C-alpha cells in the first residue's frame, strides 16, 4: 500500500491499539476498518495488534472476497479479519460510514449474551440515531447471516449489539467510530447497573423525539 491507503493502514492499526488501551476490547478480539476509494482497509485475523505493523493491515476490494480469498480481491501479506463481510456490507449500505469498530467489550457483551438491546432509559441512547439500540440476532461469526442480521439492526442507527458476541459501531472516521464505541460501552455499563435496581424507568417517546432533533445539530458542524 502507498499514499492515502498507507496512511489509512496506519490509522486503522493505531485505532485497534487504542481500542484495547481504552478497555473496550482485549487481545486480538474485535476488529477495525476504514473506507478507502475502492474498498476498505481492515485489521488482519488472529493477530495481536501490538505485534502488527502497518503492512499487516489488509485491503479488501469493494466487491468483497471469497471465503478463502481465492478471487484475489483481498491484497496484502495477511488474511483479513474473519468479520470482513459485515464491514463490507456496512460500507455498501451506509454511505456515511467512513470507519467501523467491532469490540467484545464487557458490558455490551453481557447484555448481548442475554439478547438485550438498550431501551430509552437515558437520553444518550439517541446518540446512536434512534430511540433504542437494537441487538442483532445471533449467527455464527464471520458468516453472511451475521452480516445480514447486523445490517437489519443498524437501520436508522450507527450502532448495535450482537447477540452472544459484542457490539459494532460506525462513524465518519476512525476517531469518531472509536469514540462512539467508548460511549456505547459506557451506556451499556450504566444500563447494566440500572438493571440491578429493578425495571428501568424509560423516557417517553415525545422526549426522545426532542433529543433526537437536538442531536441532529449537536457538536461542531462542518
Image: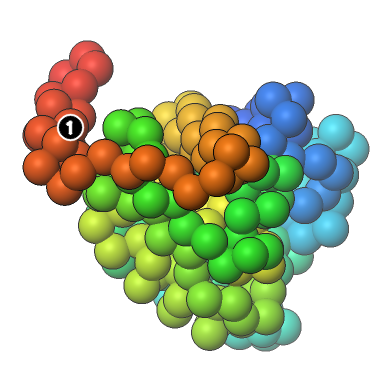
Q: Is residue 136 visible?
A: yes
Which of the 4 image quadrants contains residue 45? bottom right
Q: Is residue 5 visible?
A: no
Q: Pinpoint residue 166: horizontal percent, then vertical percent.
A: 64, 56
Q: Nearer the viewer, residue 150 or 207?
A: 207
Q: Pinpoint residue 21: horizontal percent, then vertical percent.
A: 75, 25
Q: Does residue 201 sit above or below 38 in this rendering?
A: above
Residue furthest front as drawn: 198
Report the colour scheme. Answer: rainbow
Quadrant (top left, top right, bottom left, bottom right) of the C terminus? top left
Residue drawn 59% across the image and 77% down it = 138
- The kind of secondary structure element at disc 1 is helix
Q: Nearer the viewer, residue 212 or 123?
A: 123
Residue drawn 72% across the image and 44% down it = 106
Q: Pinpoint residue 131: horizontal percent, then vertical percent.
A: 26, 49
Residue drawn 81% across the image and 41% down it = 26
Q: Does residue 33 sit above or below 50 in this rendering?
A: below
Q: Is residue 137 left or right of residue 75?
A: left
Q: Residues within 10 Å of mark 1 (few under 14, many from 20)?
A: some
Q: Nearer the viewer, residue 17 or 44?
A: 17
Q: Which residue is mark 1?
A: 211
Which of the 4 image quadrants contains residue 6? top right
Quadrant (top left, top right, bottom left, bottom right) of the N terminus? top right
Residue furthest top as drawn: 220
Q: Is residue 101 left or right of residue 160?
A: right
Q: Does residue 74 sit above or below 26 in this rendering?
A: below
Amino acid at each position: 500500500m502507498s499514499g492515502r491507503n498507507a496512511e489509512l493502514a496506519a490509522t486503522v492499526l493505531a485505532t485497534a491499539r487504542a481500542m484495547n488501551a481504552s478497555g473496550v476490547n482485549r487481545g486480538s478480539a474485535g476488529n477495525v476498518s476504514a473506507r478507502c476509494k475502492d474498498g476498505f482497509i481492515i485489521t488482519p485475523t488472529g493477530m495481536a495488534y501490538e505485534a502488527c505493523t502497518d503492512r499487516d493491515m489488509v485491503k479488501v476490494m469493494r466487491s468483497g472476497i471469497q471465503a478463502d480469498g481465492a478471487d484475489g480481491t483481498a491484497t496484502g501479506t495477511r488474511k483479513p479479519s474473519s468479520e470482513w463481510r459485515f464491514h463490507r456490507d456496512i460500507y455498501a449500505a451506509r454511505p456515511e460510514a467512513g470507519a467501523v469498530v467491532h469490540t467484545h467489550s464487557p458490558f455490551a457483551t453481557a447484555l448481548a449474551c442475554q439478547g438485550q438491546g438498550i431501551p430509552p432509559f437515558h437520553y444518550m441512547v439517541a446518540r446512536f440515531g434512534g430511540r433504542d439500540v437494537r441487538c442483532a440476532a445471533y449467527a455464527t461469526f464471520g458468516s453472511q447471516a451475521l452480516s445480514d442480521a447486523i445490517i437489519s439492526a443498524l437501520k436508522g442507527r450507527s450502532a448495535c449489539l450482537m447477540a452472544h458476541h459484542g457490539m459494532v459501531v460506525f462513524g465518519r472516521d476512525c476517531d469518531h467510530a472509536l469514540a462512539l464505541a467508548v460511549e456505547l460501552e459506557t451506556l451499556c455499563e450504566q444500563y447494566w447497573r440500572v438493571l440491578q435496581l429493578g425495571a428501568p424507568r424509560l423516557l417517553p417517546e415525545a422526549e426522545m423525539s426532542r433529543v433526537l432533533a437536538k442531536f441532529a445539530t449537536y457538536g461542531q458542524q462542518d
